[in-house]
């Protein structure tokens, strides 16, 4: 039986898509769940109340979670239970190094070694790969001690082979409407739509990119 790993990222303090992703992972019988950071939002008061139940869900499902850049700004977003919320975010590592089914997995929010800003942005506004960026990142990552690199941050749904490394970004549960399952050791990657919407390959907070729907 393959080992299934559920992948989520950039929940941005929005509970409903996370709940749906976790239900999908339960249905698909994943063995573990990885969250690549940016659990907290953009400081929007209307979704402040989602942070604590969102944290509780991540803990309840034993998610292996790392910190993203937004996860350092939670004091601006939380008016109640600040100590409990702060303790959770303070406990998050900047990256993870795992070995599952003989595959070396490196998890970071933006890019190795433990960057939280910038990000690996390989896709153009139409969702096609910039070949020069792919070549550049292939060279940049050539010395990384990993077979699989899992990232978030960029709000781009990615599954690209960069030299000896398989790069995966599940995109944002709330903005890209997506979660992902990685199966090992066969290295199969499957995307799952959330919120009754087709996954969007590229999403940007400033809406500078055009939404490009994932092919069926």
Image (spheres, grey):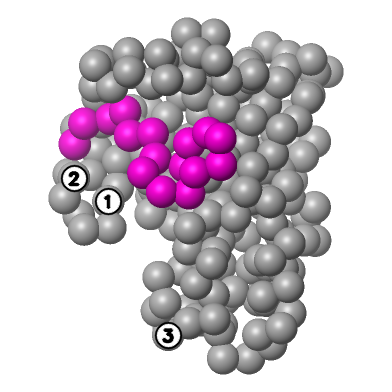
Task: Please tell me which of labels 2 and 3 falls first in the chain.
Answer: 3
Which residue lies under the disc numbered 2?
A: 209
The magenta stretch is 110-125
| Quarter of the view holding residue 106 | top right
List x then y, in percent, for residue 126: 19, 32
Between 196 and 135, which is closer to the camera in this rendering?
135
- Residue farthest bottom in this picture: 79
- Pointers 1 and 2 in contact (C-beta within 8 Å): yes
Above or below, 114 relative to 126: below
* Label 1 – label 2 distance at C-alpha: 6 Å
Q: Is residue 70 covered in magenta?
A: no
Looking at the figure, which quarter contains the N terminus? top right
| Location of residue 212 in the rendering, given as x and y in whole percent from the top left corner | 24, 38
Residues under labels 2 and 3: Cα distance? 26 Å
Task: Describe the element under mark 1 as helix, strand or loop.
Answer: loop
Residue tagged 3:
45
């Amino acid at each position: 039986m393959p080992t299934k790993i559920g992948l989520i990222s950039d929940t941005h303090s929005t509970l409903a898509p996370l709940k749906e992703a976790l239900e999908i992972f339960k249905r698909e019988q994943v063995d573990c769940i990885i969250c690549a950071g940016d659990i907290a939002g953009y400081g929007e008061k209307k979704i402040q109340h989602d942070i604590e139940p969102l944290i509780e869900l991540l803990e309840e499902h034993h998610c292996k979670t790392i910190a993203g850049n937004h996860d350092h700004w939670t004091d601006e977003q939380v008016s109640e239970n600040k100590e409990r919320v702060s303790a959770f975010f303070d406990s998050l590592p900047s990256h993870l190094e795992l070995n599952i089914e003989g595959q070396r997995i490196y998890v970071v929010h933006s890019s190795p070694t433990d960057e939280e800003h910038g990000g690996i942005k390989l896709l153009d506004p139409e969702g096609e790969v910039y070949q020069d960026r792919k070549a550049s990142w292939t060279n940049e990552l050539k010395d990384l001690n990993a077979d699989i690199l899992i990232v978030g941050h960029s709000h781009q749904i990615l599954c690209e082979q960069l030299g000896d490394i398989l790069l995966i970004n599940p995109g944002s549960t709330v903005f890209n409407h997506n979660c992902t399952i990685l199966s090992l050791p066969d290295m199969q990657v499957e995307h799952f739509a959330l919120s009754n919407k087709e996954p969007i390959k590229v999403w940007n907070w400033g809406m500078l990119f055009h939404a490009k729907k994932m092919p069926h």
